[in-house]
């Protein structure tokens, strides 16, 4: 009698295995973005990542387990990128912070879109979203503090900054407008809000 499939991914202990899992994540993200979660198959993910199908199932016993791991990975990558920005030395200016936030958005835009589609379809649990939101608000509050603002325990500025970042993440990517110009405008909006939030003199 066969045992039921695991409900969690296998964590590789060696660098080679970690590199393989990274390739699987990148292949799955690309295929889910191109074809949708439902249409993409584990066989295609294995082929795109140059992974033997048996190895893929060893790391991720089902496509649902892989999808849940994508959500966790996205949250970890987003929080780590924000921590690196906040802790950057020398101290940040609002322009530096705006450029840094925009860079994070550009790097993780496709990954976030895929994760949101998985949540909307009920493929991964909504319960993983609220802790991430709380952690993101805490990071935004830390960023404002680093810029010289004085956030309180329930700082609306941190919440508003998070909403601005989400709005920029969600800008259409269909080629209807030049991407560099669109992101340039988004960077300006972020900079102006950060300058206002921390009480610095806007650049002319």
Image (tube, rainbow, N blue to C red):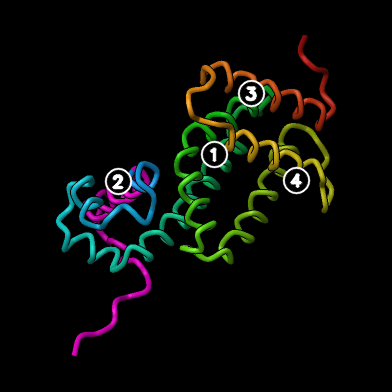
How far separated are the C-alphas under marks 1 and 4? Answer: 20 Å
**Residue 187 image label:** 3
Nearer the observer: mark 2 or 4; the answer is 2
Query: Is the residue 94 above or below the residue 159 in the image?
Result: above
How far separated are the C-alphas under marks 4 and 3? Answer: 18 Å
**Front-most of 7 and 157?**
7
Q: Residues within 10 Å of mark 4 (few under 14, many from 20)?
A: some
Nearer the observer: mark 1 or 4; the answer is 4
Q: Residues within 10 Å of mark 2 (few under 14, many from 20)?
A: some
Q: Secondary structure at mark 1?
A: helix
Query: Is the residue 29 above or below the residue 179 in the image?
Result: below
Q: Which residues are magenta?
A: 1-30
Q: Which mark sits nearer the N-terminus, 2 or 4?
A: 2
The residue where tag 1 is placed is 84
**Front-most of 12 and 102?**
102
Q: Which mark sits nearer the N-terminus, 2 or 3?
A: 2
Q: Position of residue 169 (x, y in %)?
A: 58, 37
Q: Evaluate if marks 2 and 3 touch, with contact meaning CB atoms under 8 Å apart.
A: no
Q: Position of residue 156 (x, y in %)?
A: 82, 45
The residue where tag 4 is placed is 159
How far separated are the C-alphas under marks 3 and 1? Answer: 19 Å
Kindly identify the residue that appears in the image at 24 percent across and 85 percent down: 3
The residue where tag 2 is placed is 27
Kindly identify the residue that appears in the image at 61 percent across and 27 percent down: 90
Nearer the observer: mark 2 or 1; the answer is 2
Q: Evaluate if marks 1 and 4 touch, with contact meaning CB atoms under 8 Å apart.
A: no
Q: Quadrant of the N terminus?
A: bottom left
Q: Which mark sits nearer the N-terminus, 4 or 3?
A: 4
Q: Evaluate if marks 2 and 4 touch, with contact meaning CB atoms under 8 Å apart.
A: no
């Amino acid at each position: 009698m066969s045992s039921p499939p695991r409900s969690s991914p296998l964590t590789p202990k060696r660098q080679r295995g970690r590199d393989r899992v990274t390739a699987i994540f990148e292949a799955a993200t690309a295929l889910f973005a191109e074809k949708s979660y439902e249409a993409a198959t584990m066989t295609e993910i294995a082929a795109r990542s140059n992974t033997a199908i048996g190895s893929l199932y060893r790391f991720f016993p089902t496509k649902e387990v892989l999808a849940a791991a994508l959500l966790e990975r996205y949250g970890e990558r987003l929080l780590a990128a924000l921590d690196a920005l906040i802790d950057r030395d020398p101290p940040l200016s609002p322009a530096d912070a705006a450029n840094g936030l925009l860079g994070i958005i550009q790097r993780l835009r496709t990954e976030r879109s895929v994760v949101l589609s998985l949540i909307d379809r009920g493929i991964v649990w909504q319960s993983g979203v609220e802790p991430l939101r709380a952690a993101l608000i805490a990071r935004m509050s830390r960023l404002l503090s680093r810029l010289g603002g004085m956030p309180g325990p329930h700082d609306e500025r941190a919440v508003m900054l998070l909403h601005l970042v989400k709005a920029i993440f969600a800008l259409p990517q269909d080629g209807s407008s030049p991407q560099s110009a669109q992101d340039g405008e988004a960077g300006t909006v972020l900079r102006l809000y950060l300058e206002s939030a921390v009480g610095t003199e806007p650049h002319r």
